[in-house]
Amino acid sequence: MSFKRLKRAVAGAALAAAVGAAAVFGGCSIESSHPRARLTLEFNGTEYVIEYTLYRNMYPQTVRHFIELADAGFYNNTIIHDYTANDWYGGGYAYDEEAYAAASEDDGFEDYLNDSRYYKEDDYLALFKEGKLTSSVYTGYSYDDDGNMTVSEEDAYHTLIGEFANNDHVIDEGRRGAEYGSLKMFYSDKVIEDIAAAHVFIKTGSGQVLEHDYEYNSATSLFALQVGSSSSLAVANYATFAYLTGESDINTLDDLLEAVADYIDDEYNSDNDFLAPTEAEIDRIENIAEQAASTEYDVPRAAIVIRSVEITAY
């Protein structure tokens, strides 16, 4: 399916900021309800700058996590590593122009994605160990003098709490769905045989400690950018935490998708020829779930690069 054939109609109301939202996991120490982020993507030598509004009032810990990663430069010069008709996935692999071009020419993306110079899991874990990522998931708990569950930073795990309905994160009003251009924090499916061992303890924004299933609290750095009118990622299972700020940003994303579609029309017979199905090992730093050894991505043969993610308003 060519992106060039997709037409977008976005109502003015969809661009308005959410009002009166209150989340069960609410609370955050940074000032504004709606920080801003600037994503600069590059394709075929052209940059596309897109402004985002982040919904901290609804997804406080997801937004904080994204901001911390962005401020650390984690997302800069990474790639869209998995390309589908409705969602593009990024945040997991670094970009090396020469190596990427060679992988495209020689069908060598499996080596690329499994090369420690390019996969970002070790870099992510290093940030966590350096204390640059705020903890929200823990492997143990205790009780305080009043009989309330509490957690210790010694038991902190490196993943992110899942702020969505199926993980008991409830937004009273104003919630927006998955929309064209929106960003969703993403976690890979987990293979869990021992359910008891796969439980974790999550600390909500209000400080409450709860025991929860691990799978929904296992995101790290990956996010999905919705590029279709619908998404394969259900709102109930993923935190949709950022939206295009204005009409010009919709137009910029349209321009990027059209440039990709034109490139495919010029250089390849179809989208399928543009994509390289590639098996990659994932979750190397996982030690809770019994994760499948590999997954398959559709890697674009011409790089779609996330040049930078900059937080422009906190």
Image (spheres, grey):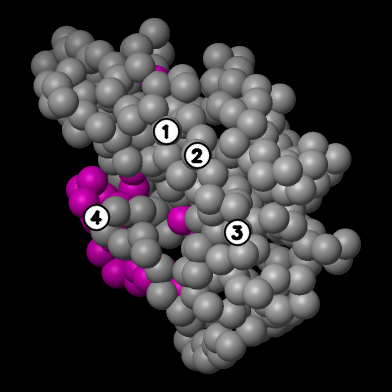
Q: Residue at x 24, y 55 (%)?
A: 165
Q: Earlier in the sequence, mark 1 or mark 3?
A: 3
Q: Which mark is residue 275?
A: 3
Q: Which mark is residue 187?
A: none
Check disc 2 and report its element: helix, strand or loop: strand
Q: Residue at x 11, y 16 (%)?
A: 147
Give the percent coordinates (x, y) of residue 239: 39, 54
User: In the figure, residue 100 lies in which quadrant?
Assistant: top right
Q: Residue at x 80, y 46 (%)?
A: 101
Kindly identify which residue carries mark 1. 294
- The amino acid marked with disc number 3 is Leu
Please say whether residue 172 is one of the residues in the magenta stretch.
Answer: yes
The answer to whether residue 240 shows anywhere in this view is yes
Up-down relation of residue 269 to residue 73 (above or below): below
Which of the two marks, 4 or 3, is nearer to us in this view? 3
Kindly identify which residue carries mark 2. 279
- Classify 10 Å Cα crowding around label 4: few (below 14), some (14-19), many (20 and above): some
Instruction: Left or right? Give the position of 125 relative to 51.
Output: left
- Mark-to-mark CA distance, 2 and 3: 13 Å
Q: Look at the magenta stretch and give its main secondary structure.
A: loop
- Classify 10 Å Cα crowding around label 3: few (below 14), some (14-19), many (20 and above): many
Give the percent coordinates (x, y) of residue 87: 50, 63
Kindly identify which residue carries mark 4. 165
Total numbered circles: 4
Residue span colored magenta:
157-184
Q: Are marks 2 and 1 in contact (CB under 8 Å)?
A: yes
Instruction: Left or right? Give the position of 87 relative to 98.
Output: left
